[in-house]
Image (cartoon, coloured by chain):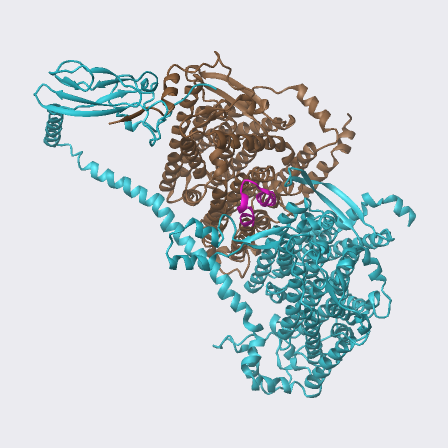
Chain colours: A cyan, B brown
């Protein structure tokens, strides 16, 4: 041990590289060379990669510095990139990893459970032609998940975060030959991306306010986030009073409409709340919480071990991990925490309700996962970070065990039914305890654990969460003279508690419903032939869930076919190990009996929560044991009800309920039709928008810019072309008309003149030069020297005194004795009164050639008037 | 150094080479193995070579002392152009000679361009070369490189050979003309990236239009002529406005100093009068926005891409579009920082709404894969432009990196689309489905490039987008809009996943129903060798972006500081009517290095005094 400590100093803990590299190498080797290695080679590579990684993770856990402040093991791989902060400071983003108690525990879960699931899959997937591909993805997933939990900063976490999403996408769509699976994978990735959007925004805000993306520094500088931000109106939009001031003459209706949108006062929230909400959006995407939970049930399209590893034990808990990891940020905003807790609570009960009547065994487990994740979010939302994380830990075992058990059942059913949907339908199961005892017992134990039977793992963790929700409150941080933060109303914690208890009852009910329907009673799969296919005749899509295969083989006589069988050892061994953990893991943090080794290890990670999360009132702590009662009662009620309904009465009450309230039953069965709602609202809207844009792009933008321009040019071309006839007569006529026009112009006199007033200001001298023309003679009036008759004088010089205005009149007579007149008024401003007139037209001396004379002064002001080098 | 030492020093490269050679399955040809091994080894070597080391400062000094060969840039520009001329003398029947010669010229160009990396890219100009061209008009041949153009030049020399290699697989007619066009294009593009004389820049800017016009018009699809004309007219419309603005700027400079010059550095000092600034800014920027292309002047791009041959598309997307963004950064922001700064919040809004979001949504609705990729370019370049508008060092670094990223990943995407087009002669997504079964390697490569394009961390796309988004939020320039812009830009990452995964699913997943797709061959040797460097670069940039960012950082900071200072001055001192000249000390001496020397002391030209008198505004003339 000491030797290891010397080998791996805490600040350069290269063992982490081993933990990470082994799965990555496994992924690469299996992915690129897997086909050549053969299945045995692939299995060896995958298992040894994960096994080695587990051993290294275990060593890491053991080497973790113990003591008061806790400790971290850190390893920096290389400088990824660096950016500049708000103050221009350089903020390095390193590929760095650091491990504290929480991440070390997660590493053990990921590699440990991961190893068991790899072992299980090596048998489960043995017949699949994509064996190597499967293990490459699975190893890659473990690498990404380890990156996520070991990351030292949010950018590296994001690598893992998207990496697991990517692997999830690949694995859900593993059997990509079916459109359904590929669609489910895509849906998972896109919904996750909505969450990632939140995470990106959160990172930007954190970077701005805390000046770092490292968790240690984010948590240390979390107080900087207590800065009010105006979220509405954004940008340059005014508030009501500003708008009124800017538009005094707006009519009443217009004003009323505008006032609908503009607030009286800017709406401000604290940056911490924004970060919290954005981060929760990310967490909700990854951890399947309302409103982004819809992808997880569909994700069951992937192979069952994938559901166990990714969609139950590890990846989906990343959101909880993130919230716990950035707990200091969330503690700066009770509103964000309330959002987390309330949405977690809502998810817990909502998903549990959907789970009640599902027929697909994996769907039941999927909704149960969503619901359990809701419990975890209640935990981190009420400030019980350790408890929430503990539920992540225990849930990993029993839910992985349940999924693998379901996989074992499906494996057995597959021997008989070669149809994915049918082999997962619990209505086709029943009585399997006879054929697969190990699966049955491990499944049962895990059911007890998840239902919260004392003293199994699920009991301790769920109870801890609910107790914390009941007993604690969150103290808002002090903000000095700023507007105080929103605080929790006193009833919120208790409401969450009671809703949680109801959800726990439902959990017990649907889990045991699934258990009894699967393992007890008679095997109903006899009715289904091997290779059974969906009837091809017209069948409403909606009702095939209820009564489809009843119209086939209604007689119920068993058909010949292989029997279900227990799975081989490679599959049952993981089940037994996981079941053992599901039974005993709870004692790692059993607060009521004061035995919590894990709690002690985790305590230094959440020191900040100690001050911010306090007991609700005096004497509440005495209620700890009594408040355990409702939790146990929930287990008993749920389990008992399930037993009565499905074991004793063979499911008759469910049928009765279905008949009594067909609408409600169907609504629940159809998952409250949330998917349809999203399709209609969100997807439909984006789709419509895209359609509009596409049409506009083609007809409006391209139409105006390209087609219309081209049309205009073509139009002029056509018009002008008609003049180019090539007939001499037409040209001759045009020439005649043109000459006539020129002649007319020459016959008429034009009294134009250029005024050079550049010396007007200094010397009061203005030079007026008249434009020349054929036979022009000029007569000036008002120049001072009176002129009686027309003469050749083209240019006159006039002196104007300050404040004086002179009217000058120019008469022009041309060779045809026609006359024209033009008058000028020349004003020289007075000494004491600078001209206040509107912009004065200026003739820049250097620009216009003197005496050029053809540009009237008023056309020139746009021209530049340089002043020379400065 | 003994050979054994070399082995020990470069074991990662050797390992990578062996690994690369092992990647293809059993029956692969030696050529493919050797090629992939070589590409892998060279890429690793590249990373090792450029890895930031502790002794960086010493190495930098050593390199500085070694000096910069002044003709390197001339070589880079002239080699392809001279090569293009030389191609004309090779008989058209000698196909392999033509191809070999083209490879040779492009190869030498690439190796020579690697030389640029040996010099530490400190702020200011490097490899500067100045020669008088038309002294009476102050037109000079002035080329130089800095940390910004460095990567774009390298991108050009890197992508063009790949495009050439891939093209020779599918283009069978008029090889000679193709070689000519390709080399001329390369010369034009590199010249435009390096020119610091506005006249020279304009010449190259227009020069590269011609070969691209030929490429689309000669080797393109069914509607090629129309698309080529559209491409040409759009770009030309912008360019002539730019030319007018250049001339106005030069004329103003002449008015102020008495000297004619087209030099970018000298012209940077001119602050035009308020209206003239805005008009000239738009004249320049419109030309660049069309090239980028930014909404709403983007519609030439899908048409051009759909009709262009694969190689043309690759170069068009990977390099030519970057000229728009690069030129905006260099010239619009450099010459007219005032309007660029004032308008940045609005323009950023256009980049987000019109580029990132609109481009993505329209891409989603396209049924032609190539069209879809073209619209995705609009979205990606929206990110680049957003980074530039944000005008933070972070955002600008992200923008430049994203230019390179887009070149790599979209270039690869166009190559991939070309692969399937060569087999099926269609690009309609509805024609495909389930291709992953028959073309697994193709599917894997497509998926990797897709995720690079979507911006999954670990690939190049992420780093660029991340920097741009962070830079946007940190931007002072965007003011109150920074927050909403960040949200909009980040929302773009969702849509990127939507349209890219849509096309992946449609093409590769689901049942293999279309009988025409049942026996498609997987990637050929040529195709895989063309794609390998791009795929490797995706990961190299994704994992080791600091190799790239370190070398551009100082130039970006210089440009950023200058932009900040000069835009402030330009806004403060811009007159209603007069142009002004900023004092030289406004700029860093590193920036002004190479500015044309004054022949005579600056004296106001003759007419200036009189006009100043008139400026007093006391004279009033009424008719």
Query: Residue A320: x and y, percent?
Result: 70, 60
Rendered position, B369 above or below A779: below
Is residue A162 in the magenta section?
Answer: no
Residue that protrudes farthest toward the right in the picture: A2
Query: Residue A277: x and y, percent?
Result: 63, 57
Q: In which quarter of the image is residue A565?
A: bottom right
Residue B257 visible? The answer is yes
Query: Residue B357: x and y, percent?
Result: 49, 50
The residue range painted magenta reads B466-486
Query: Residue B44: x and y, percent?
Result: 68, 37
Please give left or right for residue B33 compared with residue A832 in the image.
Answer: right
Please give left or right for residue A303 compared with residue B381 in the image.
Answer: right
Residue visible at 65% across and 37% down in the picture: B43
Rendered position, A848 above or below B150: above
Residue visible at 15% across and 17% down in the picture: A778
Main SS, magenta residues: helix
User: Which of the pair A151/B342 is nearer the observer?
Assistant: B342
């Amino acid at each position: 041990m000491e030797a290891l400590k010397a080998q791996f100093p805490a600040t350069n803990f290269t063992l982490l590289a081993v933990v990470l590299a082994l799965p990555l190498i496994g992924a690469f080797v299996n992915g690129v060379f897997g086909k050549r290695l053969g299945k045995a080679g692939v299995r060896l590579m995958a298992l040894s990669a994960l096994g080695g990684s587990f051993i290294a993770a275990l060593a890491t856990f053991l080497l973790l510095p113990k003591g008061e402040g806790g400790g971290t093991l850190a390893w920096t791989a290389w400088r990824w990139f660096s950016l500049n902060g708000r103050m221009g400071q350089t903020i390095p983003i390193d590929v760095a990893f650091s491990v504290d108690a929480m991440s070390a525990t997660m590493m053990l879960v990921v590699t440990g459970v991961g190893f068991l699931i790899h072992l299980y899959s090596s048998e489960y997937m043995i017949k699949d032609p994509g064996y190597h591909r499967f293990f490459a993805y699975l190893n890659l997933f473990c690498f990404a998940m380890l990156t996520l939990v070991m990351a030292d900063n949010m950018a590296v976490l994001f690598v893992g975060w998207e990496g697991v999403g990517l692997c999830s996408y690949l694995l859900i769509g593993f059997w990509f030959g079916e459109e359904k699976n590929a669609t489910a994978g895509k849906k998972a990735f896109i919904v996750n991306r909505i969450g990632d959007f939140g995470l990106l925004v959160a990172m930007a805000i954190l970077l701005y306010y805390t000046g770092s993306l490292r968790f240690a520094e984010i948590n240390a500088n979390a107080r900087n986030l207590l800065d009010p931000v105006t979220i509405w109106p954004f940008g340059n939009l005014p508030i009501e009073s500003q708008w009124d001031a800017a538009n005094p003459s707006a009519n009443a209706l217009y004003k009323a409409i505008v006032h609908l949108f503009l607030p009286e006062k800017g709406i401000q929230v604290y940056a911490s709340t924004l970060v919290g909400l954005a981060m929760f959006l990310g967490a909700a995407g990854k951890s399947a919480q309302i409103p982004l939970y819809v992808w997880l049930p569909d994700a069951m399209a992937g192979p069952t071990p994938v559901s166990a590893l990714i969609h139950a034990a590890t990846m989906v808990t990343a959101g909880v991990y993130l919230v716990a990891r950035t707990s200091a940020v969330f503690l700066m905003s009770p509103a964000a925490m309330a959002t987390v807790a309330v949405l977690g609570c809502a998810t817990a009960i909502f998903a549990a309700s959907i789970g009640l009547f599902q027929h697909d065994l994996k769907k039941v487990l999927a909704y149960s996962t969503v619901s359990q994740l809701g419990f975890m979010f209640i935990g981190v939302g009420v400030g019980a970070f350790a408890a929430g994380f503990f539920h992540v830990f225990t849930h990993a075992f029993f839910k992985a065990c349940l999924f693998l058990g379901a996989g074992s059942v499906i494996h057995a059913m597959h021997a008989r039914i070669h149809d994915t949907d049918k082999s997962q339908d619990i209505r086709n199961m029943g009585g399997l305890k006879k054929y697969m005892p190990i699966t049955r017992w491990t499944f049962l134990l895990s059911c007890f654990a998840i239902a919260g039977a004392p003293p199994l793992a699920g009991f301790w963790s769920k109870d801890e969460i609910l107790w914390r929700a009941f007993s604690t409150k969150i103290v808002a941080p002090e903000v000095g003279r700023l507007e105080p933060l929103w605080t929790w109303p006193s009833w919120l914690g208790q409401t969450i508690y009671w809703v949680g208890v109801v959800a726990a009852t439902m959990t017990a009910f649907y889990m045991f419903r699934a258990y009894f329907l699967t393992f007890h009673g008679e095997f109903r799969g006899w009715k289904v032939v091997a290779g059974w296919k969906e009837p091809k005749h017209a069948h409403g899509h909606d009702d095939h869930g209820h009564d489809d295969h009843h119209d086939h083989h209604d007689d119920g006589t068993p058909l010949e076919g292989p029997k279900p069988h227990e799975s081989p050892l490679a599959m049952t061994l993981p089940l037994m190990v996981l079941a053992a953990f599901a039974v005993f893991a709870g004692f790692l943090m059993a607060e009521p009996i004061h035995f919590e080794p894990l709690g002690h290890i985790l305590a230094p990670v959440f020191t900040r929560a100690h001050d911010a999360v306090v007991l609700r009132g005096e004497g509440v702590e005495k209620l700890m044991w009594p408040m355990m009662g409702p939790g146990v009662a929930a287990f008993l009620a749920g389990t008992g009800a399930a037993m009565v309904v499905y074991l004793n009465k063979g499911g008759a009450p469910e049928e009765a309920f279905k008949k009594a309230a067909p609408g409600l039953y169907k609504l629940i069965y159809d998952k409250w039709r949330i998917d349809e709602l999203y399709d209609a609202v969100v997807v439909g809207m984006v789709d419509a928008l895209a359609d509009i844009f596409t049409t506009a792009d083609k007809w409006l933008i391209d139409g105006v810019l390209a087609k219309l321009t081209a049309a205009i040019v073509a139009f002029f071309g056509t018009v002008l072309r008609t003049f180019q006839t090539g007939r001499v007569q037409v040209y001759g006529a045009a020439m005649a008309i043109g000459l006539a026009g020129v002649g007319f112009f020459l016959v008429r006199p034009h009294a134009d003149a250029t005024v050079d007033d550049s010396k007007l200001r200094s010397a009061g001298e203005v030079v007026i030069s008249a434009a020349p023309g054929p036979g022009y003679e000029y007569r000036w009036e008002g120049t001072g020297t009176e002129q009686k008759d027309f003469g050749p004088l083209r240019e006159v010089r006039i002196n104007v005194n300050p404040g004086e205005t002179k009217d000058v009149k120019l008469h022009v007579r041309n060779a045809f004795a026609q006359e024209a007149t033009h008058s000028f008024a020349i004003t020289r401003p007075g000494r004491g009164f600078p001209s206040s007139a509107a912009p004065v037209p200026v003739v820049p001396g250097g620009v216009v050639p003197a005496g050029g004379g053809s540009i009237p002064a008023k056309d020139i002001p746009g021209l530049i008037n340089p002043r020379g080098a400065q | 150094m003994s050979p054994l030492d070399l082995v020990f020093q470069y074991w990662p490269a050797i390992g990578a080479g062996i690994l690369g050679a092992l990647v293809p399955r059993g029956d692969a040809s030696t050529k493919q193995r050797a090629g992939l091994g070589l590409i892998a080894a060279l890429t690793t070597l590249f990373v090792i070579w450029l890895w930031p080391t502790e002794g960086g400062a010493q190495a930098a000094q050593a390199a500085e002392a070694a000096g910069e060969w002044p003709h390197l840039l001339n070589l880079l520009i002239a080699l392809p152009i001279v090569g293009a001329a030389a191609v004309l003398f090779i008989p058209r029947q000698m196909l392999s000679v033509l191809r070999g010669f083209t490879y040779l010229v492009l190869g030498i160009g690439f190796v020579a361009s690697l030389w640029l990396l040996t010099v530490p890219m400190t702020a200011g100009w490097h490899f500067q070369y100045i020669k008088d061209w038309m002294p009476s008009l102050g037109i000079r041949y002035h080329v130089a490189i800095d940390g910004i153009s460095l990567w774009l030049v390298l991108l050009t020399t890197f992508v063009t050979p790949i495009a050439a290699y891939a093209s020779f697989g599918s283009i069978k007619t008029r090889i000679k003309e193709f070689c000519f066009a390709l080399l001329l294009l390369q010369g034009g593009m590199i010249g435009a990236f390096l020119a610091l004389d506005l006249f020279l820049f304009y010449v190259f800017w227009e020069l590269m239009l011609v070969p691209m016009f030929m490429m689309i018009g000669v080797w393109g699809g069914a509607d090629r002529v129309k698309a080529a004309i559209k491409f040409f007219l759009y770009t030309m419309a912008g360019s002539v406005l730019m030319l007018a603005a250049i001339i106005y700027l030069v004329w103003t400079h002449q008015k102020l100093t008495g000297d004619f010059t087209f030099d970018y550095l000298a012209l940077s000092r001119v602050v035009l009068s308020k209206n003239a600034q805005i008009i000239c800014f738009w004249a320049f920027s419109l030309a660049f926005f069309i090239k980028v292309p930014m909404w709403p002047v983007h519609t030439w791009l899908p048409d051009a891409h759909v009709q262009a041959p694969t190689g043309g598309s690759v170069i068009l997307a990977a390099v030519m579009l970057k000229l728009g963004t690069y030129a905006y950064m260099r010239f619009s922001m450099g010459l007219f920082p005032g309007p660029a700064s004032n308008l940045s919040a609005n323009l950023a809004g256009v980049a987000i709404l019109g580029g990132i979001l609109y481009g993505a949504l329209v891409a989603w609705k396209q049924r032609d894969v190539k069209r879809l990729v073209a619209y995705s370019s609009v979205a990606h370049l929206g990110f680049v432009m957003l980074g530039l508008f944000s005008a933070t060092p972070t955002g600008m670094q992200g923008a430049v990196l994203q230019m390179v990223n887009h070149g790599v990943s979209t270039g690869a995407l166009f190559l991939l689309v070309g692969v399937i087009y060569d087999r099926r002669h269609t690009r309609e997504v509805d024609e495909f489905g389930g291709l992953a079964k028959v073309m697994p390697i193709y599917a894997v490569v497509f998926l990797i490039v897709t995720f690079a394009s979507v911006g999954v961390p670990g690939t190049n796309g992420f780093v660029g987008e991340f920097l741009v988004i962070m830079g946007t939020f940190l931007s002072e320039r965007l003011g109150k809009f920074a927050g909403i812009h960040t949200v909009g830009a980040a929302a773009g990452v969702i849509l990127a996943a939507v349209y890219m995964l849509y096309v992946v699913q449609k093409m590769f997943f689901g049942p293999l129903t279309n009988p025409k797709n049942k026996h498609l061959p997987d990637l050929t040797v040529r195709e895989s060798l063309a794609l390998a460097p791009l795929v490797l670069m995706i990961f190299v940039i994704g994992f080791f972006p600091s190799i790239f960012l370190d070398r551009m950082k100082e130039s970006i900071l210089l440009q950023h500081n200058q932009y900040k200072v000069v835009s402030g001055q330009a806004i403060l001192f811009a007159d209603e009517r007069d142009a002004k000249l900023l004092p030289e000390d406004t700029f860093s001496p590193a920036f002004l290095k190479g500015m044309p020397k004054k022949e005579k002391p600056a004296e106001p030209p003759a007419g200036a005094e009189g006009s100043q008198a008139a400026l007093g505004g006391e004279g009033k003339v009424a008719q």
